[in-house]
Image (cartoon, grey):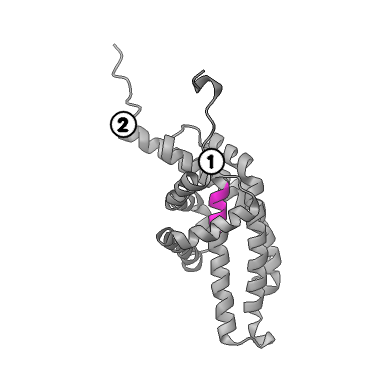
Amino acid sequence: MSGPAPDRNGPLTRAASAIYWFVVVEVLWVLLTAPGFVAALFLARDASNLPLYALAAVPVGPATAAALFAWRVFLRERDPSPAHQFGRGLRLGWADALRSWVPALVALVVLGTNVAYAGAAGLAAPVVLLQVVLGVVVLLWAVRMLALASSFSFRWRDAARLGIYTLLNRPLVTLGMVSLLVLVAGLAVVTFDAVPVLLASVLTYFLARNENPVLDDVQRRFVAPSPPTSSSTTP
């Protein structure tokens, strides 16, 4: 005599599904970014290597956008296939992610080099502080652009304007992003560099939750609704 059928909506099933999602997204994110991180391990920690560190960080943009796409699906539908959703997000958003991420990396290299060699260049302390602030703003803008690229395909200049607008218009969400970036930096400093990488799926999950209100707002206010299909229109 067979026992009762397992409850597919029970707490244990949901917990197992969530753990599976975190593991799969983590593995895929690490696999996509591993070449850059491995290359970075062989670089000396010197400001002269900032361009090479930026080059190693290029895959982080598309990988993060793909993870954000997958987590957005998870938060809405609990799809049983995280690998499929991650791959779909990568396929749809990698170009838009690179178009925003690469210019941001270039800007961060320029600003970081200026700060690192501020003494040799004779830059005043207020100028150095301004460049640090600009670096933080560029990083916040870049992360917001990755979130937009994970769900939409805007022209670059439209996405850039939306990135700036939403940073200013949704200050609490922006503060949440700042908190996550501080957490990542703190983990890297207090522990070691690999810890944020090993927690990438958890960090991108919380980033996706943080960015959801902005993406929903952009969907409602700036994305035209899909036209009705012929089958749904009245003849």
User: What amino acid is labelled 1 in the image?
Assistant: Ala
Residue at the spot x=49%, y=44% of the render? Answer: 219
96 versus 135 height, above or below? above
Residue 139 drawn at (x, y percent)? 56, 63
Q: Nearer the viewer, mark 1 or mark 2?
A: 1
Residue for badge 1: 224
Q: Is residue 30 left or right of residue 72?
A: right
Disc 1 and disc 2 in contact, CB within 8 angstroms: no
Res. 57 image quadrant: bottom right
Q: CA distance from mark 1 to mark 2?
A: 38 Å
Q: Circle 2 sits in a helix, a strand or a loop, which is it?
A: loop
| Magenta region includes residue 147 | yes
Q: Which residues are magenta?
A: 143-149
Residue at the spot x=52%, y=28% of the render? Answer: 228
Q: What kind of secondary structure does the magenta stretch mostly adopt? A: helix
Q: Is residue 142 left or right of residue 208?
A: right
Residue 25 drawn at (x, y percent)? 52, 43
49 versus 173 height, above or below? below
User: What amino acid is labelled 2 in the image?
Assistant: Gly
Residue at the spot x=66%, y=81% of the render? Answer: 117
Residue for badge 2: 10
Which mark, by number, is residue 65?
none
